[in-house]
Image: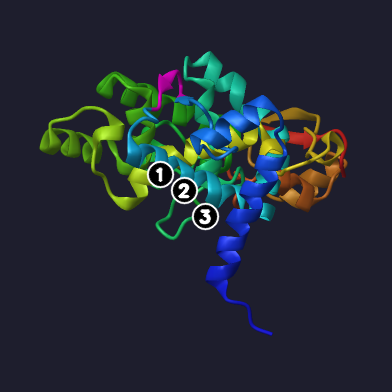
Amino acid sequence: MKTNKALVSVLSVIILSGILVFGISGENKDKLMREGTPMYFPAEIDFAGEKTPLHITDVRERLDRELLINANLDATTALIIKRANRVFPIIEPILAKNGVPDDFKYLAVIESGLVNAVSSAGARGVWQFMPDTAKEKGMEVNDLVDERYHLEKSTEAACKYLLAAKEKFGSWTLAAASYNGGMNGITKKIDEQKVSNYYDLALTEETSRYVFRILALKEIMSEPTKFGFNIYQSELYQPIPTKKVEVDSTINDLTGFAKSQGINYKILKIHNPWLRDKKLVNPTKKKYAIEIPLSGY
């Protein structure tokens, strides 16, 4: 029997709201219900310490939209929460070292779902760099090596971009928006509209949703049980211990190299997705650090 999709969508929202409402009891529940505030909606929220003006009607409704959408993407959001347990411990210290706020790890979440995604436009990796931008930020991109797939190096490159954007705009929120809309694109909108706050700008559909998607994932991932994601610690994807093997010469056969390290080619590629061929040609004697897992294979 066919089911009306619109009805299913409405019911999903009602069910989500119901779960979240009935999950809170007592005086707080009565107070929020009297004020007409959905139980899942935050009283306040900020991005990188910059407060989101929830008193503005369209700002409030745009955040509400992204919270409801992402809370109802059950499998997708659950997988992101599981992956974050493995990926965030790699991203977080790199952001901290570079003076980039921790909230930017959620930018990586909405860019790629914390996997090495491939976009139709040619962006690659967790941070979704285009080839030219990646090269500008110091990454090697060719048929043999593509460091957009290297989590540590691409995170370092993202930090370079975000620090430059913060210096240009004076706002971490606008820096985040520019990651989607481009620095030139955001500058053009600021000049045209004579305002300098992300929440006051009329932007393209994608860029206007961008920061709100980050905020929604931050809220959901910070308090997953509030949104119905009851994931046990044992279900989270655990970090895999590795050792780094430094090489500065050509490897003609990565399968043979993998076997010499006690693993197979598949495991080698999983831990080193930046290796894009079956060999590593290295005439310049560049030093590469190849990760070899110590367990999990």
Where is residue 101? Give x, y as percent. Answer: 49, 20
Q: Residue furthest bottom?
A: 1
From the viewer's perspective, is residue 217 above or below residue 1? above
Name the residue type under label 1. Answer: Arg
Q: Are marks 2 and 1 in contact (CB under 8 Å)?
A: yes
From the viewer's perspective, is residue 288 above or below residue 119? above
Front residue of 273 and 168: 168
**Mark 1 lies on residue:** 62
Few, some or many residues within 10 Å of mark 2 (<14, 14–19, 20+): some
Mark 1 vs mark 3: in front: 1
Where is residue 43? Give x, y as percent. Answer: 51, 27
Q: Is residue 107 visible?
A: no
The residue range painted magenta reads 47-52
Number of marks drawn:
3
Residue at 55% from the left image edge and 31% from the top image edge: 105
Front residue of 177 and 294: 177
Q: Is residue 278 left or right of residue 170?
A: right
Name the colouring of the figure.
rainbow
Name the residue type under label 2. Answer: Arg
Determine if the magenta segment contains residue 208: no
**Mark 2 lies on residue:** 65
Mark pair 2, 1: CA separation: 5 Å
Figure quadrant of the N terminus: bottom right
Name the residue type under label 3. Answer: Val
Where is residue 144? Give x, y as percent. Answer: 55, 49
**Mark 3 lies on residue:** 118
